[in-house]
Image (tube, rainbow, N blue to C red):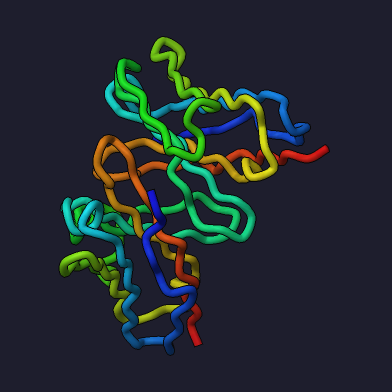
Amino acid sequence: QVQLVESGGGVVQPGRSLRLSCAASGFTFSSNAMHWVRQAPGKGLEWVAIISFDGGSKYYADSVKGRFTISRDNSKNTLYLQINSLRAEDTAVYYCVREEDAFDIWGQGTMVTVSS
Amino acid sequence: QSALTQPASVSGSRGQSITISCTGTSSDVGSYNLVSWYQHHPGKAPKLLIYEDNKRPSGASDRFSGSKSGNTASLTISGLQAEDEADYCCCSYAGSSTWVFGGGTKVTVL
């Protein structure tokens, strides 16, 4: 079945870096734009970034621009999010999301906690 | 990229109908027919309920319906059931390949 599985979260010190991964299965990964969306504890969902189906276009929320990098490897059916200079406010569950008729398929999320 | 405005909570009795509002601006909700709604049970993946303002994806219950007027979109849940108790969030395309979500609304079934 169609599935997205995130990994790579954990507890990280402020200022450090982290790379999240999202393994896709059950659909033609290379046909869809993909997004990262996050949810901080007790807060609503926040759109983070989008990458086009071929990786040629990338856009970011102002809150993460310059620190986050979205990428994909269509040969591995995998989406990535590189997070640099982590801050306390980056603490959140990070979701990998497929775009097809809006955000139609979501992963279970991976938790990132920024703490010293 | 300011968040869309939703009420923090809405409640209703089983069998009733409730409506959740989602207010944006002329730069997002009011400019595009691209409002979507999601149901989110804690600890689970969000589920798409409505897309393009008022379209239901296959598999979504017809008890959920969407509408929009100006800068405000709405989600109506008809025949409220116990399993509808969850968080509901709206989202709108905001131009320049960016999206914006609402703060979320907690629905309680009395």
State the residue at coordinates (47%, 20%).
Answer: A78
Q: Nearer the viewer, residue A57 or B44?
A: A57
Residue A57 image point, x, y percent: 31, 21
Q: Residue at x 28, y 74 (%)?
A: B76
Q: Where residue A10 appears, x then y in whole percent?
A: 72, 34
Question: Which residue does the image show at 45% across and 84% down from the upper left?
Answer: B11
**Residue A39 at what x, y percent from top left?**
55, 49
> Within the image, what quadrant is residue A106 found in?
top left
Left or right relative to A95: residue B61:
left
For the residue pair A15 and B38, the one nearer the viewer reads as: A15
B2 shown above or below A48: below
Q: Name the residue at the right extreme.
A: A116
Q: Quadrant of the C terminus of chain A?
A: top right
- Camera-side residue of B98 and B36: B98
User: Which residue occupies the foreground of this view, B66 or A61?
Assistant: A61
Q: Is residue B37 left or right of residue B67?
A: right
